[in-house]
Image (cartoon, rainbow, N blue to C red):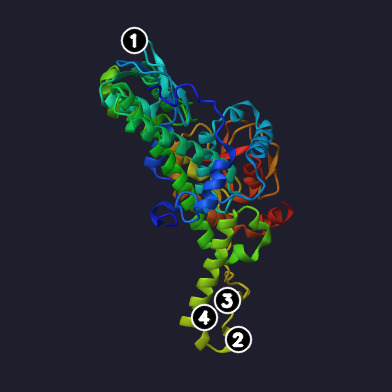
Amino acid sequence: MAAPWDDDFDAPIAGPSFIDRVRNAPDDDDGGDFAMHDGDDFETARGRVGGGLSVMGQDVAEETPFQQLIRHWMNERHAPDILPGQEMLLGRILDHVRKQSNDVELLRADPDSSEEEHFRIMLVQTEVERVKFIVRSYIRTRLHKIEKYARYISSAPDVHERLSKAELEHARRYSRLVEYHFKQSVLQSLPEQQQSLDEEVAFMPPMVAKPDKKRPVVARALVDCPPMRLPDGTSTEMKKGQISMTPYYVVEHLLLRGEVELV
Amino acid sequence: MALPPSLRTSITPPELELVASEQLVEIVPLVSMERTAFISGAYGPLRPPTKCKVPLWMASNLKLKKKCHIVPPVWLNTDFLQERLTEETTSPSFSEMPFRFAELAKTLLDVAPDDLQNPERIRSLLKDIREARQAKSREGLAKLDHNELLLNNLCAMEINEIRPFFVRGMDVLTKLTREPGQDAMDQT
């Protein structure tokens, strides 16, 4: 039997399959967290990815989807703020993971498969596990930030577009739960003027935790970057390959445009 | 299900190794295998004794099963490292090394010492280089301010090592110079 992954490396991955799976299996651990927006079909996604990449120069344009995911995972791990979710990229990679796993199942069920086949199965499975680890870590990093800043996120509309539907829903429910718990356990027994959860007292940290955009991060330039403004008012430019440690808000716009990566 | 607390502040060395394992290395296969499509790309066909490029994770997997020899990268030999060590100890700046050399070297020394020339010497040279560079990065702490610190030529593992302390240091300096920072943030 010919291995199903012999020559179909470039075969298109069926577009709607991931969407279907998400719709049909809302409780699926792997799929539930990143439901896609309706009407976002695969082609537009690919167009969008392509369009975004052209700005980033040769090196980045040659990144495979998995390398892109690794870059986004690293960025998410290092950035103090929550970054725009990469739902389309995740969708493509999860589709690919599922396809590889299906092929493995198919070959395993075949009693005639040779020793070489078993060997390839083992390698393919090893890779699938590596990919799954990174996907999971990426989602969990976002989940951590969502829970940490749940009350800020649910009150700040400009953050909403960086989250998927499921993530936003989770942020809202989580912050409602926390508020309910605070009220039930402590606040309801306090005098009314001390019950609020969003007071801003001068010289005190605000009660709603916000991402600390001043936290230093280490950024590496993927291309020659436009000038950026440093905290002391001077401006500087990063050349491709330069590594610089600076407060997050200084490089935030470069990071969102994919011109730097956090390392 | 959120990220465990131990992983929240920084990336860990095993995770850096995981990332570095995506890099391609050359192997001399001892078994043959058809070209196979993986998620990160298509690799093969393996036809002994023709050299072939595969990701490091696959190379070490094959190596552990004694199904290939790994061709060490050009920088992983005693001559090159000796030269870098001299450069490192004579010049005040960091010499240029591959960004993930520490992870790569460790994996190769662990799984394929028999494919390297004089692995013991390589190990000790790498250690000397690491110490020389570590001393420089500690000196770099004096240059820390609330603005920016250039870390050119530092590799992933070294950045990760100095990160917690440097981030804290810069954080404190930012707090001490709050006003100008506030201005810049309003304007961006």
**Mark 1 lies on residue:** B49
The residue sitting at 63% across, 74% down in the picture is A200
Asked if residue A47 is positioned above or below residue B114 in the image, the reply reads below
**Mark 3 lies on residue:** A197
The chain that hosts pointer 2 is A
Q: Secondary structure beneath disc 1?
A: loop
Amino acid at circle 2: Gln
Q: Is residue B129 visible?
A: no
Distance from Cα at disc 2 to Cα at disc 1: 79 Å
Sequence order check, earlier mark of 4 and 3: 4
Sequence order check, earlier mark of 4 and 2: 4
Distance from Cα at disc 1 to Cα at disc 4: 71 Å
Depth check, mark 4 against mark 3: the one in front is 4
Residue A44 position within the rendered picture, expressed as x and y whole percent measured from the top left: 68, 39
The chain that hosts pointer 4 is A
Asked if residue A94 is positioned above or below residue B167 in the image, the reply reads above
**Mark 2 lies on residue:** A193
Asked if residue A85 is positioned above or below residue A62 in the image, the reply reads below
**Mark 4 lies on residue:** A183
The chain that hosts pointer 1 is B
Within 10 Å of disc 3 (Cα), the crowding (few <14, some 14-19, many 20+) is some
